[in-house]
Amino acid sequence: MKKYTTIILLSLLVLGCGSKKHADDTTPPPTTNETAELISFKFNESSGQTINETKTNATFSINGPSGSAERITGVEGKALRVNGFYGWATGKLNVSYPTNKVCVTAWVAPSAFPVQRKDLDQLSENTNASLFSNVNTTTNAGVALGIDQYGRIIGQFKVGTAIVNIVSDQQIELKKWSLVSLNINGLSGLASLYLNGVKVKAIAFTSGNIVWDNNATIYIGKESKIKTIAGFDTNGLTGAIDQVSLWGKDLTDAEILTQYNKVSPAIPNLKIPIETRFAEDIHRPKYHLLPSSAWTNESHGLLYIDNKYHLFSQRNYNGPYLEHINWGHYVSSDLVSWEEKTQVLWPQPGFDEVGIWSGHAVIRDGQPYIFYTGVNKAKAGIGLATSSAPYDSWIKNGAPIIANVPSNIANADFRDPFVFQHNSDWYMMVGTGLRTGTARGGLFLYKSISTDFKQWSQQGTMLEGNPSADGTGDFWEMPIYYNFGAKSIVLINKLPNANALYWTGSFDGSKFIRDNVVPERLEVINHLLSPSIHPDANGNLTAIGIVPDGVNSAKHKQQGWAHVFSLPRVWTLVNNKIKQVPHPNLLNLRGTSKNFTNVSFDQNSSNVLNGASGTQYEIVATVNPGTATRVGFSLNKNLAIGEQTLIYYDFTTKTFVVDRSKSSILPDVPTSNQSSNYVLPAGDIRWRIFVDASVIEVFVNEELAFATRSFPSAGSNQIDLYAQGGTATATDLKIYNIQGGGTASVSKNVELKEDTIHPVVYPNPSTENFNFKFYNIEKTTAVAAYVFDINGFPVKKIEKLIDSENTVVNWNGYMDNGMKAREGVYIIKGFVGNDLFDAKIIVK
C-alpha cells in the first residue's frame, strides 16, 4: 500500500493537481471525444433481471434466480451488485470493434477479491473477474478488464497471434469505488493500466491488429472462462460495478483523469440486504452468529480488548463453498449482538497466496497478535499480523515466522497454530499428522525467542496420539491449550471423522503430560467443531465453535450461505471434565414466555403443551423421567406431514439421541440420526434447549452440551414433549420467545414480565452481605444466578439450594476474581427453579 501511495503522489505532482480538480483552478478540463464511446452500461434500471447497453439499447440478462438481481447506489445513479457466484450480466452486441486502438473504463467497488482454485489453477494463472470481457475462450480473441485474485487490475487481449496480459503491481481498495482503465494501442504496441486516473502499469508488446470475435458473449462482472467448484462458478466478481464503457480509441492520460474527476462517489453500501435477500429462508438462524452470506467455517481468535469482543473465522466471501479463504471479522460488546466487519486478512502473492487458513490470536502487553496458517500449494507456513485500535485493519509480517514443516520429523501436514503463555515463556503448538511408524495425530511445539513473536525455536512434539488406544485418528487440527489452575487441558479436533476431544493434565515446558490415555469428548453428540476460547470481561472462559450445516452443495447454493457459529458458552473444569453452560448474557435474548407445571406425558400423548410453537425460542425444563424409558422433546413437529425432530435420553441404552429420520421431507438436507452413550445419574433431567430455525443447541444438567441441525418444511414448528415406555412429568417448563435478526444476533432488551420474581434484598444499600429472600418456596429448589455489573458483565456466580425453611441466598460483596465489588449499581439475575428472577443491588 505504501508503494501504491507513492506512485499516486508522484503522478499527481507530475500532473500538477490533486486527484480531484481544485476549486480555484479555472483551466478547462481536456475534452474527451464522447463519440468514441462505442459501448456503455449505466446500470440505472430500478429492478428486474436485465440491464440495457445504452449505445445500442441491447438487453443483457442478469445471471441468477428470478428476482435475485440487486442494485445499490452507484457513482451516479444505481450500480449492479455482483455476488461472486451469481449476479453478473451477459449478452451480445452488434458493434464494429476497433482493431487499432481501444480503451475500457469501469468503476468497481469489490467486497472481496475473486477466487483462485487451490487444486485446479496454476499459481501463474490469474483469475480475471472481469468488469468487461468478450473473450472467445477457444481462440482468446477479445478484450477483458477486471481484477485478479489479489485485487490487482488485470487486462487481457489478443494482438495478431499473441495473447497479451498486463497486471498492476498493487491491489485496489476493498469496499471503495475505484475507476480502472485499460488502454491498448496496437499500432505502437503499448498497453497501460490506470487506477483512479493515474497510470500504474505500462507494457510493450509486438504491434499488430487487435483481434476480436464479433459473436462472442460479453460478460459484465465475470470472466469469460468457465471455472467451477462443486457446481459454483468461481470467477465472478463480488462487489459492485458501475459505468462500464468501451471506447473506439485509446484515451489520453488527461482524458482518463477527466473520467475520474467527473464524479465524487460516496463510500458504497455493500452490506448484504439480509432482510430482503433471505426473507423467504425459513432455515436461516436469527440470533446465532452467522455470515451475512457465502461461506464460513472454523472460528478462531476470540479476543476481548478495549471493551469489545472480536471473533475471526474462515471466510469465502465469493460463495458458500470452501475456497480462497480469508479471515472474516465480527465485533460485539456482549457476545450476543454481533456486527460483521471487513475481512482482516486475505491471500496475497507470497507464502499465503492460496489461502489464509486457521490460527489463533492473543494479547500481549495490550497488543493483539494474529497467528495464521498461510498456504501456497507447495507448503504451509505460519504467518503473523498485528493491529491497533479499533482493530479493523491488520498488518501482516512480510515473511512467515515459521517458514515450513519441520523437515526432521515425517508428517502429513502442518497447520493451525495456537499460542499460549506458560510461566514467563510463550509457546506455539501446531497441528499435524505424524508419519513415523503408525500414522497418528500430533502437535509440533515451538518456543518464542523474541518479544515481537517473529522468532521461534522448534521444540519437537508436545503431544502425540495413539489411534489404536485413544481413537484420535491420524491428524489433529485446531488445537487448544488452557490452564484452569490446578489442571490444564489440551483439546484437538481429530481427523478423519472430525470430533473435538480433550485431555486434562499438565504442561512441563516441553511435553503435555496426560492424566489419561483416552480423551474426553467435548460434546455429548458430535456436531460442534473447532471452538475458539477467550476469557470474557469477568474472566469466565468463553467458547464459540462452528455448527456445520451438514447439507450438500445444492442446498448451500440455494440458500446462499453456509454454516453457523454456536452460542457463547462458559467452560469450567470440574472433576477433570469440561462443564458447558450457556453464557449468562444470553438471558438478555428472552422475551415473553409460556409456562407449564406438572405436565404428565407418555407415548400416547400429543400436544401436551397446548399448541406451543415457534422457530426462535428457548426451552427451560425440569423433567422427572418417572417410569419412561425415553424422555425428551419433539421439535419442529407437524403431524399433517409427519415431520418431527426427536431429542431424548434413552435410559435403556444410556444414550442421548437426536432422531432426524422424520425431520424433513425436503431434499438435500440431513436426515441421519445422531447418538452417543452417556450415563446420566438418577433423578430429574434439567434441560435448556435453544432453537433458532435450523440450529438446535442442547444443554443438560448444567454440564453437558451438544448441537445439531434440522431443516423442516415451512409450518413444521410445533413444540411437544416425548416419552416412551412409561409416564414422565415435566415439573417445571418454560418456553421463551427469542427475537433477533441481521448478520448476527440482535439482542432485545425486553421489559420485565409479570412472571419475573423480585426477591427482597436486605440490607440494600450496603457494603457487603446482601441477602435475597424468596417467598412461596414449598420444596427444595435450586437457585442459579449471576451478579452483573452496570455494564452487563457477570462478576459473581451464585448457586444454592433453598427450601421452605431456608429461603435466603447471600452474596458477601466479593467477585469471583477475589476482589471486593466497587461502589455502584449491580443486578442479580438468574433462576429459582425454572422461574426467572432479578433484583437491583447498590454497593456503597
Image (cartoon, grey):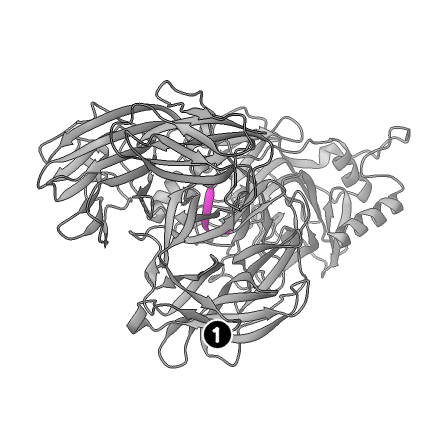
The answer to whether any part of residue 741 appears in the image is no
Which segment did they paint magenta? Answer: 292-300
Please tell me whether residue 94 belongs to the stretch shown in magenta: no
Question: At 29% across and 23% down in the image, what residue appears?
Answer: 776
Near mark 1 (Cα within 10 A), the count class, few <14, some 14-19 or many ≥20, is: many
Question: At 29% across and 52% down in the image, what residue appears?
Answer: 524
Quadrant showing the C terminus: top right
Q: Is residue 123 left or right of residue 489?
A: right
Residue 514 percent coordinates (x, y): 39, 69
Question: At 38% across and 31% down in the image, what residue appears?
Answer: 808
Residue matched to label 1: 461
Element at label 1:
strand
Q: Is residue 265 left or right of residue 662?
A: right
Q: Amino acid at mark 1?
A: Thr
Residue 397 percent coordinates (x, y): 67, 60
Residue 293 percent coordinates (x, y): 47, 40
Residue 27, above or below 430: above
Residue 491 percent coordinates (x, y): 42, 60
Q: Nearer the viewer, residue 534 or 398?
A: 534
